[in-house]
Image: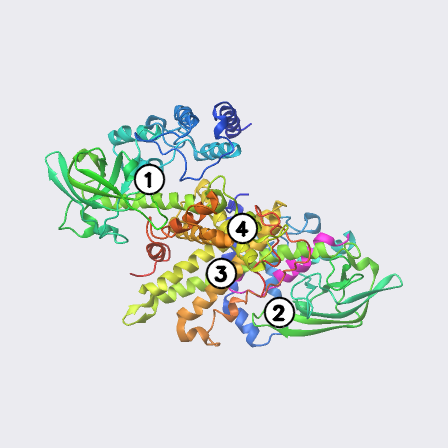
Amino acid sequence: MQLVLTEDQELLAKTARDFVAEKSPVARMRALRDSNDATGFSKALWKEMAELGWVGIPFAEIHGGAEMGMAELAVVMEALGRTLAPEPFLSTVLLAGQTLALGGSEALQAEWTPKIVEGDAIVALASDEARSRWNLCHVETRADAEGDGYRLTGEKIQVLDGHVADLLLVSARTSGAVDDAAGVTIFAVRPDAAGVTIVRQNRIDSRNAALVRLDGVEVAAADVIGAVGEGAPILEAAAARATVGLCAEMVGSMQEAFDRTLDYMRQRKQFEVPIGSFQALKHRAAREFIAIELSRTAVMAAARAIDAADDEAAALVSLAKAQCSEAAILVANESVQMHGGIGVRRARHRLLPEARPCRRAEPRGRCLPPAALGGVPGLLMQQPRARE
Amino acid sequence: MSDLDSFRSDVAAWLETNAPESLRGRGASALEGVWGGKKWVYANPDAKLWLERCVEQGYTAPTWPKEYGGGGLSAAEAKALGQEMGKLRVPPPLIGFGLTMIGPTLLQYGTEEQKLEHLPKICRGEIRWCQGYSEPGSGSDLASVQTRAVRDGDDFIINGHKVWTSYADEADWIFALVRTDPEAKKQEGITFLLIDMASPGVSIAPIKLISGSSPFCETTFDDVRVPVKNVISKINAGWTVAKALLGHERTMIADAFGGGASGTSKKRKGLSDLARDYLGGDGEVADPLLRDEVAHMEMDTRAFLLTLQRTRDAAKAGHQPGAETSFFKIHGTELNMRRSELMVRLAGPQGLGWEGDGFDEDELARTRDWLRSRGNSIEGGTSEIQLNIIAKHVLGLPD
């Protein structure tokens, strides 16, 4: 594992940074949010990102993807995180996209992946429930066998981009108790199927989400992702990749908040001197710098470990999540504090609420035996520091 | 097979033949092992043999040029050598401030004559060096050094007092900051000087620390005569040299302390094993709160080690390492302090021993390590100074 960007990755990073700077300032996300835009992101921009090849990064070449890895995707997502671009990477490329890529039948992949890669289909993963707290195996939604297929009943919360999804991937229980890993099955559900109700939700981070209610929704056996009752490991693997993507976004947004705060510290004068000359603030800024650098490392390591199918990948993903979550909170809070009063004005705020609450440990299920951290065999890290 | 692969297999074969059996499987941190010098006493004769064999190959300073006693290896070859030695868990043949601090500084600032005079002796472990920086009145404000050097023909006459001179009592030479121009702005009147500790007028007294012992000394210079040719760089230009050396020192300290499990003594247990020993638990540590702290500690250590690796990987890819070396010092030492504190806490009442019955050797050592580690955030530039350096040189915040 080499913790350094290749020339191609450097180029990708530069392209992404330039693209974001030109086409996706943070004002764009704010305008979408404040106007209660029905889509919540730009479909035209999403199409452009697809044309640049970003959407297809982790998908198989036979379905039109680039068959690259998390290392490349992380580079793009870090750039997008800088200005909180609301386009559906986390949902369509990672959470749902990877669930489909890891467990979907040939037929389902052949039908959906090319459309995803082209930027023509949004897919969303409906896994979380009111009482699941990011435990991907806590599934109360039922899938009752009926004839050749199933009937789904339950409610899924905060389904990212569920309000505009062309396909929903829904976890439901075909057997077992509520927290069992065995018995979780993933189904591909058309959002226009009878019995599906989708209600838009508003979150503090302005990420687009929806409630998805399933009232006896009929699903064919052919629409099962992976094997019946064996969906949990697929969800876990997709969630691990999504976690790395999320962490990369966090690195981008914390770096941006930090850079803006440093600018402010150089310019803002009190007592006739720049506030950045005060040692009390300098030292805190230096601490933030350390936290950001450690976060950047952890994301690079986790991404590369997943790409190499390294035994330590699960531990390194947890490390990245823990490190980035703490650092993002630190940087966001310090940014607000160092901006003083304007740091808490909603009209101008650009730091905290939009720094995307990072404790929402979105894709963070932990029901399978958690991986021991390297060198600490037996030390089980149930939800290592990523809990809320 | 690439050149590097064939180098690696040659090295592996050489090690197989030459690394003494009694040293294998021992490992060692950067602060343990053979420091060399005229006063060095070998506890294990194989350590002497191991040093001599490595000196012959230039492996004590693998990347230094051969004409100065180094191995002339590329960074990639040196890394391969380190990895192959790591596989056998043999300690480095030689350690110390010659190799890590004054050596790299001489390579950068020394004259050809100075390099030829000092570097081969460092590589061979013949001369042990210590550092004469801090003074009673010059801690964090290092540039305020008062030790005077007055020109007298081809010599300087040195008078003054240095503190915290690590291992001065065992060293043969000292590299020191002395004031040659008391009228100039404080950074501009300093000269970097090499002094033979055997010179008449040098006296040394050890300092005792809260851990009960220490490598530190006070060193006094009383009309000590030093040839002007021992000046590194130019007279009154010592501050630049001093700062370059501090960069090497920070890297050395970070490597030594930041390693967590790898930086601790060979026979001591890791955190999770200790936690299970003292707190019970089959597989996982019984106390959930301490288990969480152990996990936290291990994760933070891992993130730091990966960051050290990232800097090395970036350097290999041709990127310049930046001022993040000061982040390595502060973060590495803080991790070490937290780790040693946690180790004592895990031991519960067994962490309270000072000496005598009822405490085993490791317990006593851990408690003393914890006390000793309190100095980590002070020595080599306090944590506060490190934060200042980051704020100024990395973040560009105004003075």
For residue A327, which numbered disc appears in the image?
3
Residues at discs 4 and 1 in contact (Cβ within 8 Å): no
Earlier-in-chain disc, 3 versus 4: 4
Position of residue B279 relative to residue B81, above or below, is below
Of labels 2 and 4, the one closer to you = 4
Earlier-in-chain disc, 3 versus 2: 2
Residues at discs 3 and 2 in contact (Cβ within 8 Å): no
- Which residue lies at the image location 79% right of the left edge and 54% below the top edge? A227
- Mark 2 lies on a secondary structure that is strand
Of labels 4 and 1, the one closer to you = 1
State the extent of the magenta-drawn residues as a range: A81-105
Give the letter of the chain under mark 4.
Answer: A
For residue A300, which numbered disc appears in the image?
4
Does residue B101 appear anywhere in the picture? yes
Find residue B175 and report its horizontal and vertical position in percent. 26, 39
Viewer-proximal residue among B238 and B166: B166
Give the letter of the chain under mark 2.
Answer: A
Label 2 – label 4 distance at C-alpha:
27 Å
Quarter-of-image position of residue B217: top left
Say if labels 3 and 4 share a chain.
yes
What's the colour scheme?
A: rainbow
Q: What residue type is labelled 3?
A: Ala
Quarter-of-image position of residue B249: top left
Residues at discs 1 and 2 in contact (Cβ within 8 Å): no
Position of residue B229 relative to residue B300, above or below, is above
Categorize mark 3 by other alpha carbons within 10 Å: few (<14), some (14-19), many (20+). Answer: many
Categorize mark 4 by other alpha carbons within 10 Å: few (<14), some (14-19), many (20+). Answer: many
Q: Is residue A364 magenta?
A: no
- Mark 4 lies on a secondary structure that is helix
